[in-house]
Image (cartoon, rainbow, N blue to C red):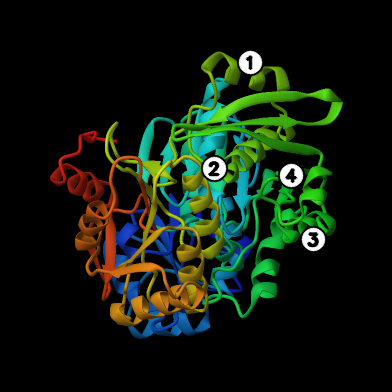
Amino acid sequence: MRQLSELAERFADRVVGDVAGVELTGITLATADLRPGEVFVAIAGANRHGAEFATAAAKAGAVAIITDAAGAAIATEQGVQLPVLVVANPRALLGALSAWVYGTGTSEGPVPMPLLFATTGTNGKTSVSHLLEGILQQVGAVTGLSSTAERHIGDQVVISRLTTPEASEMHALLALMRERGVEAIAVEVSAQALSRHRVDGIVFDVAGFTNLTHDHLDDYADMREYFEAKAPLFQPDRARRGVVSLDTDAGHEIAAGAGIPIVTVGTPAIAQDATAAAAADWVVTIGDEVPAYTEFTLTGPRGRTLTTRVPVIGPHMAANASLAIVMMLEAGFEWDDIAGALGRDGGIHAYLPGRTERVSGPTGPTVFVDFGHSPDAFEKTLAAVRRVTPGKVLMLFGADGDRDASKRLDMGRTAVLGSDILVVTDHHPRFEDPASIRATLIEGARAARPDAEIHEYSPPEAAIIAAVDLVGEGDAILWAGPGHQDYRDIRGVRTPYSARELSRAALRAAGWDVPSVG
């Protein structure tokens, strides 16, 4: 329990109403999630002000409202009887408010704060987070996870809605994990999370950087602005130490501009500058690549060398796994403990939902479902599929509506150059015309390879059936985009949908044996 009077004294510019004797148990931005005893934070949105929901918050059991001057006026007009705490910018203050309410801004108390790991970058954030969780568990740690795919509190699994939760939810999650004895937490941190204050009030023990490639230019004016949104994670107010991949040029700039101690990792086989990657503190060398795993060797200071396996395909996944291992070392885990656990278990044990996830059976075409939705992700994953496929590679994909349209031509180009057969379909059209999205993807593909075999099917339920009919034993299908997601966004409605189950159904209908679950 916290006293509202103390919160008001610490944070409010002015108070409307009586705060004396009022106790609070939590804080939230969403009336749908509000529980009795919590404070409702009302912020100005793109179309509506959160204070318009002040009456709903009061009915749900809120004990107070925190908002700006405009929100206070709206709440007063509604006749809301709750105390109103007025601040200049409630969005920017939410992290500090949440840290104070939940006690996550300090390690004081009977239960210490868990070790906190953050991973940012365009691609690989989710994979590194899940790999971190897996290796941490292998060395005996009780873990927590917050990723695009899922939230984990020990053994409890919760489906994610945002890559990084809002600050109030993030701090509540950390407090719950702390209460339940979690010892180490892996958090996926998007550029938007940093720009929109979702991880304010948190200082991570170790922050990791994967790469920076073309994406999210619907949120940022250009790649420079996108880079500058991620870079603050490597300053003392956000993290204590950093581990940076040098596989893209942005990694060098992150490392050079960091205000915290930095250790670097490089994978020459996939780096933009192989020579620079080879000069990193830790170097990743790729070994055997088969459909079930990728072998790699991690070599670093003081002659330390580890050869192990990551349970997915591709050098980029070996790079992600290596980043996770070095992040653990920087957090204080012992080299011998990590190497011993991986040696004992025959490699890394981790499940990466929808990340080059094999959903097919022992016979017929191999089908991989992947969350990748950028040109760089397409290029790396297609190359990985190619190396483990004796026959043809078919690429099946669509593109997000109402998102970064500037990458669509390049998505089509990259997809067609890396595959033998291309099938273009729909993904999340949202409020865009799906036919127009498909046309742009095909335009990019045709410009790159006018003679390519390109098919267009809508909806994706039909596309995967057609794709399975176009290939056979020894071939592979990479269905990029949907990954772990269980819905499609069609004109604002989340329609139930699973690429994994649709793939299995199509294979089964074609007469191939497939696993019933996975």
CB under 8 Å between callouts 3 and 2?
Answer: no
Which residue is identified by label 3? 253
Which residue is at the front of the view, 112 or 330?
Answer: 330
Question: Residue 337: where, in percent of width, then height?
Answer: 66, 18
**Picture quarter with the C terminus:** top left
Which residue is identified by label 2? 314
Kind of residue sitting beneath label 4: Gly
Mark found first going from the N terminus, 3 or 1: 3
What number is the disc on residue 479?
none
Which residue is identified by label 1? 340
Question: Residue 364: where, in percent of width, then height?
Answer: 27, 39
Seen in the picture, residue 115 relative to 259 is either above or below; the reply is above
Label 4 environment density (alpha carbons within 10 Å; few <14, some 14–19, many ≥20): many
Determine which quarter of the picture holds residue 136. top right
Determine which quarter of the picture holds residue 56. bottom left
Indicate the secondary structure of the residue bearing disc 1. helix
